[in-house]
Amino acid sequence: MARKTGSHSEITGPRVRAAALRLFAQHGFAAVSMRQIAAEVGVQAGALYLYTPDKQSLLAELMADHMDELLSSLAAEPMPEEPVARLAAFARFHIGFHLERPEAVFIAYMELRNLTPENFARIEAMRRRYEDALEAILCAGCASGAFRAPDTKLATLALIAMLTGVTTWFRDGGRLSRADVAAIYADMACKSVRA
Amino acid sequence: MARKTGSHSEITGPRVRAAALRLFAQHGFAAVSMRQIAAEVGVQAGALYLYTPDKQSLLAELMADHMDELLSSLAAEPMPEEPVARLAAFARFHIGFHLERPEAVFIAYMELRNLTPENFARIEAMRRRYEDALEAILCAGCASGAFRAPDTKLATLALIAMLTGVTTWFRDGGRLSRADVAAIYADMACKSVRA
């Protein structure tokens, strides 16, 4: 039997997620309708509901995918053991990862307010695991005497905010390359907690 | 002549701005209608248009007010001359100011994408003046030998992102006071650019 263009059998997860990501990043989650997402994918709204139960699930899935990717990329990253070098490597990794996907980063931070409490708790737990990885580096550095941080949790949050901030202003083709920027931020990050 | 409840003569700028701020912060600019803002103020939508031509003007006004207040508060802040002490004072000021108004901060950063190019340029110029004030401190410190920053513009953006990040997680009544947090961040900020 021939398939009609736009039939639900042509909806794929990646296409739906890509369309939702684009629209949420551009207009904000609350302003985007399932109908608009369906139009962006090129299907009828009814067909979209065969893929996902609602817009909330789609948002939670986008955020969970983003955090999954962040955690698995970090786990796959070769990292030196020595705390100062390790923090520098973490900083470079964080900047590189986030500059690759500005839309997902924007949504991951901005749309937390639009998650249901259950979804928020799930995403927050994943975010916590990532923060814990950074805090462990700071703790190791404090133990070795390389770092001095009166509150490693606070320092973790401060560093993540600093590093993620790059995504709000960086543009390829500007006066500094990604590597230049990552090197300067890594140096500031290490100095900020040095003993 | 007696005034009807909700007549336009009762609409005041502060009430409209407060209602818009609340709703934009909660739902996002794109998802809020002039009708909802009017309802929040307690007037008819038609009456609201007597106060402001459109939602875009309201957003631009909220952001410009926020930046105005930031710039005038900084100008009024007693600041030591010596660069390290001055950077610490700037960091404490920035955190104190931003923790006082989390909704305005959220909007100031998140809704830039929803400004028209003209309004964006206006707000961006104000933001630039604030960044310049911080960069001047870094330049003075580099000149005196207290700081070493290979790119003072980049360091400025890194520090502002770090300091502003406090607003995303700080809650009064937690284990650390505003002053505790500000002191720790000020110390990290100074160390991050120390020679």
Image (tube, coloured by chain):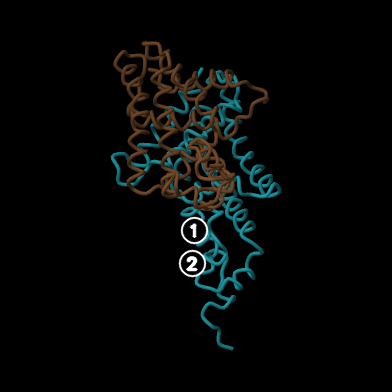
Chain colours: A brown, B cyan
Of the residues under marks 1 and 2, which one precedes in the sequence?
A: 1
**Secondary structure of residue under mark 1:** helix
Relative to B99, B48 lies left or right: right
Residue, x 36% and y 11% (percent of image)? A81
Position above or below: A159 against B62: above
Circle number at residue B40? 2
Relative to B79, A84 lies left or right: left
Position above or below: B13 against A103: below
Q: What type is the residue that disc 2 sits on?
A: Glu
Q: How many marks?
A: 2
**Is residue B5 something one can see in this rendering?**
yes
Q: x, y percentage for residue A120?
A: 36, 43
Q: CA distance from mark 1 to mark 2?
A: 8 Å
Q: x, y percentage for residue B27?
A: 48, 54
Q: x, y percentage for residue A54?
A: 43, 50
The chain containing the residue under callout 1 comes to B
Position above or below: B79 against A183: below
The chain containing the residue under callout 2 comes to B
Position above or below: A152 against A143: below
Q: Label 2 neighbourhood size at 10 Å, few (<14), some (14-19), many (20+)? A: some
Look at mark 1 in the image and give the residue it sits on. B23
Q: Label 1 neighbourhood size at 10 Å, few (<14), some (14-19), many (20+)? A: some
**Contact between labelled residues 2 and 1, with CB atoms less than 8 Å apart:** yes
**Secondary structure of residue under mark 2:** helix
**Is residue B72 something one can see in this rendering?**
no
Q: What type is the residue that disc 1 sits on?
A: Leu
Between A42 and B119, the residue placed more toward the observer is: A42
Q: x, y percentage for residue A69?
A: 43, 28
Between A145 and A73, the residue placed more toward the observer is: A73
Name the image quarter holding the C terminus of chain A.
top left
